[in-house]
Amino acid sequence: MAILENGIAVVTGASSGIGKAIALRFAHEGAAVVVIHHDHPDEAEEVVKAITAAGGRAIAVAADVRDEGDVDMVFAHAQKAFGAPTILVNSAGVDAAGTLVADMAVDHFEMVLKTNLVGPFLFCRAFVRGCKAAKARGKIINVTSVHEEIPRAGAADYCASKGGLRNLTRCLALELAEHGINVNNLAPGMVLTPMNQEAIDDAKLLEEQTASIPMKRAAEPEEVAELALYLASPAADYATGATFTLDGGLQMNLGQGA
């Protein structure tokens, strides 16, 4: 039997990058997948086609993760297509503006928080309500970042959102343990996704940006997906409220030479 046989997974940001890799990996292991995208219908449909061509089950749903009505609509589509979701992966997110706090517009700061923190809150809330109604166990995986812990000048918007998501996960873990719902953070370091496209296209820049990583390379999205698979599987039934970091040793190296 496949690891996620009979699982029903909702994956946000699944039209590219980490979310796409997770959607494909989960489907390969037997889960039906709801591929959530914002404004990339062609890319999302390609993910669905790849899954169905391999004998899996998937649908694509367009949604703004910041919109409460859209989130409810996602779960209605999931229920109609496959049944009540048993796995949620909050992978959708936007990067830092590269702007200092003194120069940052409130509208931008709020947009990042709504996408990276309020969005996961809305999806978690809807997912938990569904699990409770069905009296079912569930797994929530929130994709944070090493920046849930590591601050970076010019990234207060991103770091604040990921730090907030870290503690949202912890609060949920306390609230949901008795209901058999596990909630964990998956915190990648640098990953070769469209968010790092500039480095992907420039070998010199990539070398500079990976110099502080002990393994001297960035992760592939598929490596993140393998860790997500573990967290979604029965093997992780006793793991909750934790952050699982995948960064090639980056966090350990930051204090060296100080």
Image (cartoon, rainbow, N blue to C red):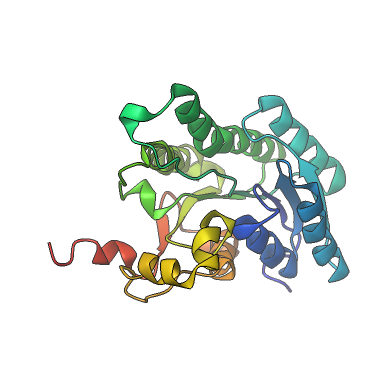
Image location of residue 66, percent across then percent down: 62, 31
Q: Nearer the viewer, residue 2 or 107?
A: 107
Describe residue 199's horizontal placement relative to residue 1 as left or right: left
Task: Name above or below for residue 130 compared with residue 230.
Answer: above
**Image coordinates for residue 192, horizontal then vertical, percent:** 53, 65
* Res. 69 in view: yes
Instruction: Give the residue drawn at x 42%, y 74%.
Output: 217
Which residue, as the protein is rendered here, is positioned at the far top?
Answer: 106
Q: Image point 36% across, 68% down: which residue? A: 208
Is 111 in front, or is 224? 111
Vertical arrangement, residue 15 with respect to residue 258, above or below: above
Residue at (62, 37) in percent of width and height: 123
Which image quarter is the C terminus in?
bottom left
Q: Residue 239: x, y in percent?
A: 46, 57
Quadrant placement of the N terminus = bottom right
> Camera-side residue: 194 or 243?
194
Q: Residue furthest bottom?
A: 215
Q: Which residue appears at 68% of the width and 53% of the height?
A: 14
